Image (cartoon, rainbow, N blue to C red):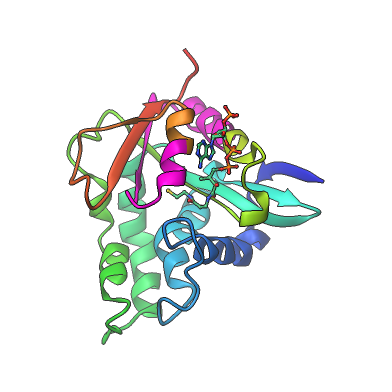
Amino acid sequence: MSAIRPYRAEDLPAVYDICVRTGAAGKDARGQYSSDRLLGDCFAAPYVVLEPQFAFILEADGAPVGYVLGTADTAGFVKHYTDSWIPRFDAAYPEPYAETDRALIQLGRHPERMLEPGLENYPAHLHIDLLPQAQGQGFGRRLIAAFLDAVHRAGAPNVHLGMSPANTAALAFYERLGFTRLSVGIPEDVLYLGRPTGND
Ligand SMILES: CC(C)(COP(=O)(O)OP(=O)(O)OC[C@H]1O[C@@H](n2cnc3c(N)ncnc32)[C@H](O)[C@@H]1OP(=O)(O)O)[C@@H](O)C(=O)NCCC(=O)NCCS
């Protein structure tokens, strides 16, 4: 049996696991970096630790198999991340960095990259990942609905996300859910999509 529920602190190891198993443009990224936690420390754990109220878990037979997480206020999140997450991140990934990790660690150490000019009217942002066995059954749509409802109630009129242009399956999913491409950033590097958080 599957269900969507709010994130709980004991879900954190599963969140790291789901993140790395879907972290190579939707495919398994285990073994690509010197730690399988690095992707989670950049793109998943800071959200559930700093803003757990915007994280939802999909569980199947009692075990987490997917999540959506993010923030209603990217600028506020960047500040909180800078003050509270970077010290933990730096302690986990001290210099010298392995060559395989360098670019990702720079993303993790520079949350201000999230404040891309042109995204001011899209204050919320999100990440969503489901393990392969949970994909293609409508759960992604339901997780996005849960997230949009939460950030809408928190006052965010619009949401954005940044994604790898190589992840064509995710792009089709987002477009099906009403996300459109935003003229922001360098589309060859990161594709930004956005939509309103409400239904009207
Ligand atoms: C991308 C992802 C979140 C989509 O979630 P999902 O549960 O598989 O998608 P759903 O079953 O809820 O699909 C919702 C709608 O999108 C459509 N859709 C989903 N994937 C699609 C695809 N590859 N091509 C075309 N349409 C697609 C579905 O047909 C469905 O349409 P409908 O509701 O009108 O019938 C999920 O597959 C996933 O986690 N993939 C791996 C990690 C990843 O890529 N995350 C995104 C990183 S940017």
Seen in the image, is 97 located left or right of residue 88? left
Q: Which portion, as a residue range, is magenta? A: 144-172
Seen in the image, is 62 located left or right of residue 167? right
Relative to 85, say whether 168 is above or below.
above
Q: Is residue 171 magenta?
A: yes
Q: Quadrant of ligand 1?
A: top right
The spot of residue 69 in percent (x, y) is 51, 47
The spot of residue 37 in percent (x, y) is 48, 72
Relative to 99, say whether 164 is above or below.
above
Q: Is residue 26 visible?
A: yes
Q: How many marks?
A: 0
Q: Which of the two residues, 99 or 92, is positioned nearer the viewer here?
A: 99
Q: Residue at x 69, y 43 (%)?
A: 5
Quadrant housing residue 35: bottom left
Q: Residue at x 61, y 52 (%)?
A: 66
Q: Residue at x 58, y 34 (%)?
A: 141
Q: Is residue 126 visible?
A: no
The spot of residue 106 in percent (x, y) is 25, 68
Residue closest to the far bottom: 96
Residue closest to the far top: 200
Q: Residue at x 18, y 46 (%)?
A: 186
Quadrant housing residue 85: bottom left
